[in-house]
Amino acid sequence: MSNPTHKIVEEVKYGLWHKKEKCMLKVSTTSNDGADFCTDISHSLTTYGDQVWYAHDIFAAEYVRNFSTEWYNANYETPNHNFEPDELAIVKVKIRTEFCPEEFMVPTMKEFLAIKFKESDPGHYKYCMEQLKKYPGHNQKYSLYELEELIEKGKWPKGK
């Protein structure tokens, strides 16, 4: 049976491939705080970092491949870079996004505390539950690392 809320969206973006380094160019953001006659932040392309730079169409990617914008005007769409056009190739990237949130639920704070402490440390579990009631909404969270630990130990399902 298919999930009626399951939705798939596909997008096409364009990026720049560094031929020698064999990697997609990434975007780096720098504050221009205190500088005169410039944008608040500058965007630059690099071969390192985490966030891949994407253009909305092939013409924007080709423009950026050929022309670097000066740092004081560099924005996401027209970033600054120090590459020669022949160092770079345009690549077409298809991004497939699937929405299926109910299959990847995380435990509520109460569920987390029950899983973590109810059997192993009932006194601490009782104290935590009292604190949740006493201070509703106040810093009621657990870390992603703690969730990953529950999943690794098989105490919370990883999802479908």
Image (cartoon, rainbow, N blue to C red):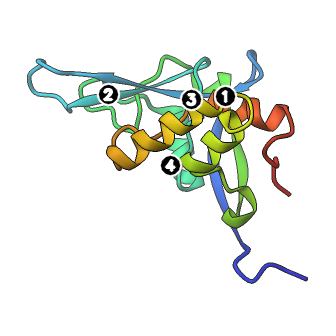
What secondary structure is marked by label 4? helix
Where residue 82 appears, as percent x and y from the top left, is 49, 16
Q: Is residue 26 above or below residue 156?
A: above
Q: CA distance from mark 3 to mark 4?
A: 57 Å
Residue marked by disc 2: 42
Residue at mark 1: 121
For label 4, the residue is 60
User: Mark 2 vs mark 3: which is more N-terminal?
Assistant: 2
Circle 1 Cα neighbour tier, 10 Å, few/some/many (<14 / 14–19 / ≥20):
few
Q: Residues within 10 Å of mark 2 (few under 14, many from 20)?
A: many
> Which residue is tagged 3?
124
- Secondary structure under tag 1 reads loop
Query: Type of residue at label 4?
Result: Ala
Where residue 58 appears, x then y in whole percent? 60, 52
Identity of the residue drawn at 68% across and 56% down: 105
The answer to the question of whether label 1 and label 3 lie on touching residues, with beta carbons closer than 8 A, is: yes
Marks 2/3: CA–CA distance: 49 Å
